[in-house]
Every structure is written in C-alpha cells, then in structure tokens.
Amino acid sequence: MEEVADTKARKGGARLCSLCDQRRAALKRPKTLEQICRECFYKVFEEEIHQVIVENQLFKPGERVAIGASGGKDSTVLAYVLSELNRRHNYGLDLFLLSVDEGITGYRDDSLETVKRNEIQYGLPLKIVSYKDLYGWTMDEIVKMIGLKNNCTFCGVFRRQALDRGAALLKVDKVATGHNADDIAETVLLNILRGDIARLSRCTSITTGEDGPIPRCKPFKYTYEKEINLNQICTYAYFKRLDYFSTECIYSPNAYRGFARELIKDLERIRPRAILDIIKSGENFRISTNTKMPEQRTCERCGYISSQKWCKACVLLEGLNRVCQSWVLGEAKALIMMAERK
Amino acid sequence: MACNSSSCQSNCYKNDEEYAEDSPSLTDRKLSTSTNGQQNLCVKCKANQPISSASAGAGAGADDAHFCYGCFRRNLYGKFRLSVTSYSMITPSDNVLVAFSGGPASSVALQFVHEMQHRAQKNFDASKDRSLPVFGVGVAFIDESAVYPDASEKVDDAIREMKLVVSKLTPPMKQLHVFPIENIYTSDSIEGKDRLTKLLDAVNDATGKEDLLLHLRMLALQKVASENGYNRLILGSCTSRIACHVLAATVKGQGYSLSADIQYVDARWDIPVVLPLRDCTAQELNLLCRIDGLKTLQLPNSPPAGINGLVSSFVTLLQEENPSRECTIVRTAGKLTPFHFNRIPEISDCTVPLATRRRQKRYNLKPMESMSSESFCPLCNSPLSNSDLSSSNKPESCQSSRFGGACCSSCRFQILPKDSSSMEHFYLSLPQQMVARVKHGSCDNSSMLRQQIQDCLLSDSEDET
C-alpha cells in the first residue's frame, strides 16, 4: 500500500488521502496506519461502528436506548455517533442521555455541564440520577468517611445500580455505554492478573445482562481509544469546539488498572493490533460453562438483582452507615467527655 | 508483630505483614508465622537458621528467608516429585531426555531428575528381585550458534562446561547430546545453516522471529529425543516463565490455544513434553542454584525484544508490587479447560506396574470432548480456533499459500511474509517437519469427518453436499 501511495500524483507537494484520493492526507489512522484526510476518517470511523452494530445485532427498530453519558470523550462521541447513525441508517431508535451524578465537587459538577450541553447539541433528552437521591450519600461524603483506599469500589457498584435505576425510570429497553477496545483489553488483562475466571469469561461480551432487568451493550468494543481521541481532536481543531470534559476524577487512584493501561500503551506502540488481539484471546479462552453464571436472586433489602442475599450496594451502604454511626458515637463520646471535664 | 531481636538482619517481619495480606497463595504452603514465637528460626522445622537474605541475594522474597536450607530444598524437591508422580511423568520403564540450556531452571531440573534416578538406582541395587527397572536419563543441548554466529566461542566454552557437569552426575551415567539447531534439516550442515538463516531473515517482525526460533528449538528437541530412543522430554519451565507466556499469548491473540501450553503434560508431540517444575518460581530456582553451588551458564543470546520483552518487563514490575502475582496468573490460566492431549496416554502395557497405571488414571484430566479432533498450526503446533479455521476456507492454488492458509492467525501475522514471492522463499526454507504437518493434518480431518457421518450416509452413491 505504501508504494501505491507514493506513485500517486501529489497535490501541492502533500500526500493524498489513501481512501478518497482527492483531499490532502492529514492524519495517520491509529488502527491501520493509513494516511487519510479528516472527512474520510470521520466516515470510516462511523461506518465501522455501524458495521459492529449491524453484525452484532445490537439494536432493534423501535427500541428506547439510553446512552450512559459521563461528559467524557467516550460517551460524548458515542452520543454523537449513535444519533448520527440512527438518522443516517434509520435504526428507528428513541435515544436518551443518562447521566449519573456521584456528587464529586470540582469534577462531576463540571462534567454534568458538558452533558447538558450535549443534550442541546444532539437534541437528546437528558436524565440525571444522583447518588444522593438513590443512596443518601455523595462520593465526597463517602471519601470523608472511609478515605481514599476503597472509594472506587463504592463508586463502581453504586454507578452500576444507578444506571439501571435511571434506565428503569426512563423506561428504556437498553443501555449503551462508551467502553472502548482499550477498556475491554485492560479488563481482560486485569482479570487474568486478579484470578477472576468468572469475570474473564463475561468481560468480552458486547452485550451483557440480557437475562437481567436492562441489557447493556458496548458499541465501541472494537474502537481504539486513540481513534476516539483523534475524533475529538479533529473536531476541536476544525470546529474550535471542545465537546467533552477532559479531566480525570479527582479521587483517581493508583488503581491496579494503571498497570494494565501502561502495558497496553506500550504494546500499541509496537503492534497496534495487539489491543484487538487481547479481546480476541478473551473471547476464545476455553472456560467451561459451569464456571460462568452466579445464581440470580433479588436483594432482600432493596429488591435489586443480586447473586447474594443482599446486593453489593446494600452491603456497602450498611457498612458505610455503621462506620458513620461509630464515628458519630465517637464524636458524641468525645463531646460528653469534654463536657464532664469542665 | 515486632521483631525484637536486635541482631535480626533480614527485614523478615516487616515484609511478613504485607505478604500475609497480599499473598494468600503462599500462606498455605508455609506455616503461619504467628505461631512462630521464636525469631530467627526456620518456620517449618523451628530448629535451624533460616537462609539469610544476604546469601539469598538481591530480589529474594521474605518467603525464602523463613526456611532453613534443608527445609527449603526439601520443599522444592517435594514440588518436583509431586508433579512427577501425580502426572506419571517418569515411570520405571521410561527413557527421559532433559532439555538443558545451562540456565537455573534446567540446571535444577537436571539435578532433581538425577537425584530421583540415583535413588531409584540405589533401590534397584538393594532389592532382591530387581522388579522395578531404573528409568534412563539423557541430556540435550540445542546449539544455536548458527543464529548468533558472534557467540560461537562462548557457546563452545559453555558446551565444555556442560560436559563436565553431566559427567559428574553419576551413577547412573547420562549421555549429553549437543545438537546444532541447523540439523533439523536433513541435509548437510552448511546447507542447513544456509536454509536456517534464509528462514529467519524472511521474518520481519522481531517477536515473530523469536517465536519461530522457539518452534524450531522444539523441533530440534523432538528430533534428538526420537532419534535416540527417548520417550519423554523434560523442560525446566517454571511458574515465572509460564506467567510470561500466559500474558504474551493473550496479547498475540492466542487465547484459544493457551491452555494447551501451560499444563503439566503436553502430549501433542511425538515425544510427550512434561513440566515437572511448573509450580516452582524462578526466584526459588535461582536461590537453589546459588546456595547449592549449581553452576549456571549464561548463554549469549539477545534479550527478548518486541512483545516478549515488554511482557517480561511487565511481569517483573508486577512481581515487585506483589511477589505472588506470577502464581496468581498461572493459577488463573490453570482454570482454563485443557485439551485432550494434555495428559500422558493411558498405559495399556501390562509390564508397567499396576500402581503406576492406577495413579495415572486418577490424575488424568477428564476429557471434555472425548473424540474431538483439533487441527494444528504447522508452524507453532497450536490447536486452531474456529476463527482461525474459518478464515482459511478459500481453496489455494499453490503449496505455499495453502501452507499459509493452514497457519493460525497469529503466525500468519507475525511470522509469514506478506508478499507472495517472499512467502515462496520462506516456504522453501521451511524444515520438512513443518511442511509435512499440513498434508498430515488435512488427511486426518477428512477421515475424522467421514467416520463421524458414516452412520448418517444413506448409501454409497449418495453425495452429501
């Protein structure tokens, strides 16, 4: 392909796009290293996602679909691409934006502004669910109570339930999230490192929770994070508009995931297709079916789906309330002692 | 638990608390340190001094600092012996070949195999009826100086050392086979060297070249074993090496075949391959070599590059963060379903003692699919997944593209040349054993299919479409 591109006539000294052969090549595509123009990049990017949606039968006409929107680049691009493809290819979907407010000042309140902007830009109705309303705690309060060691566990568990509850309130049939190929590859590696064979067997599925309340799908399963970045950078450079919120969570930890992410970045540099190869390996691991599904029940405290007597969120909340109580008790005792001393 | 001994040199108890939390896999093997009231004593026998971290050297884990020399060695040999007996790796009538590279793992493997053989010999000499024969042991070293011509002098020195090492491992005497890797070609050595160089030069990807060399090395070992009457091949692959392989295979898209490579037994080869040191970490093996004074030879070759190099540094990094990570990785991969060839074929030979046969039946992995026939990649010999098979359905015109179509997608990407003329040259430089796998494989498949549908065929003249 390189030789062919070289022999093509050069326009004003610059290389031509290898796809349309008309416009000047401005980018090197991370996935294939092709040299293409901005318009063709948008086109192949969107068309590949359309192929993924069609081949994996992610949606059916008439479905109501909520897009998990955090305001970050993945969900912003997802919102744009889905609404665009819905229009272009007549998916016949009713799309919504669903956002979760974890109550993190200086981070979430800013990114929520981005989502509100997206609501207007893409014309998609927005629903926001907050931890405060659902659980009575914001992440800021939780961190004050338990510190920075296990806060991400809380947030992850709470967010999953929050998305489901929000989806139920919107009465949607499906939730689409912006998990990209890098995310899924990291998760595969993490599950190997952590010894979680059951999760390993499920984490590469493009649709999960089909037997649960609301199935979720990941249309970006085969999309490189670098390409999503590039998509947004192009939009910024050309339209001078930054659609997404680019800071990391302020409680962002030295999570173990960081190790896997570093490896993937290094791998991508020498062999871009390694990311998709990891996903392929994950899909092909020989895991016997009887190690797969945990038993499905309902939580006795809140009625949410659970594999144990209480769902994880209720367990965590109970723990949180106990810590709070003992802290309150401790404070009360201290006050009483101070009063007695006087 | 404060270490109140002022003379305590090792930071054993400081590390102890971290490891008690982070390494559940190791705690079942060593006794709980909370029961050890005495400081500075071996946790197992509570009699001797633990190996000091000074002699253990850099990178020794706190785990080893808790055993005395005797208990440590017994523990390591115990793991070796348990693997050998549980998986029937070595039975009295066997003739085993130990693949020896001079590195710590294969040095320990050789040493332990020798000790096992030596013990069997003593029993044999002492027994009246001489009923149990002593298994035979040979040593094979694959000389790769054709690939690294600058290092040939160092390799010659190494070979001299090896001869010395092997000559000391008596009784019983063991033969050392030094096999130049170019001898996998049946022609003379100069032509062999030439073809080998052409073959490796045709591969552009650094990782692909390294992996191809590994496949050729296995071919060489198989050839030495079968030409000299051995029926088992012992590799010194340890937990650490296997952990790297797990991650590297995942990254190369070889998730399907991974479970085949990491079991104790791999019988897809003509001479079954066994891994008796699978449960030992590189750290333990290094330590044993150091304190036993086992001479390890550093063979000159380039450090792993490309993907293999990245994965190796990654695992080293993980180990620093948590020393039991390698074990966890191998344990996770161990939960993947093995293949039907991951066990020693059942011994129907009546001359083999009944106890051996019974033990083998007990530990042999239950076959998931009893009569499944796998197709194998002719280059790496790994079982092909459905996605590999479906992408090679188109009928190919020439032999070299038919060969390419039979390969797994990983080999197709990282080893096979992209353009057709380079592919031709590559195909012509391949050793016969790999070429033969394609013809053999396709015959197997169609006869297997025929057998399975025989019952459903209506009549001989009916054609199934």
Image (tube, rainbow, N blue to C red):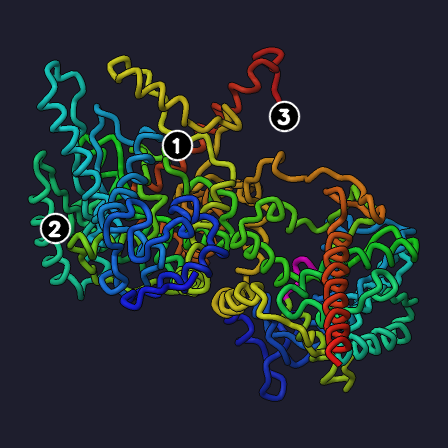
Q: Secondary structure at mark 2?
A: helix
State the residue position of label 2. B162
- Sequence order check: which comes first, mark 2 or mark 1? 2
Residue picked out by circle 1: B440
User: Which residue is at a point 55% across and 40% down the rendered structure image?
Assistant: A286
Image check: B72 left or right of B246? Answer: left
Say which chain tag 2 marks: B
Measured from the top left, where is residue A255 in percent x and y? 59, 66
Please determine whether, in this image, residue A213 is positioned above or below residue B441. below
Magenta residues, as a range?
A219-224
Q: Are marks 2 and 1 in contact (CB under 8 Å)?
A: no
Q: Nearer the viewer, residue B94 or B461?
A: B94
The alpha-carbon separation of the residues under discs 2 and 3 comes to 60 Å
Coordinates of residue A205 in the picture (x, y in percent): 68, 49
Percent across and percent down for residue A145 are 71, 69
Is disc 3 in the same subunit as disc 1?
yes
Amino acid on which disc 2 is placed: Met
Callout 3 secondary element: loop
Chain ID of residue with mark 3 = B
Q: In the drawing, does residue A280 fall left or right of residue A245?
A: left
> For the residue marked with disc 3, what is the amino acid?
Thr
Q: Residues within 10 Å of mark 1 (few under 14, many from 20)?
A: few
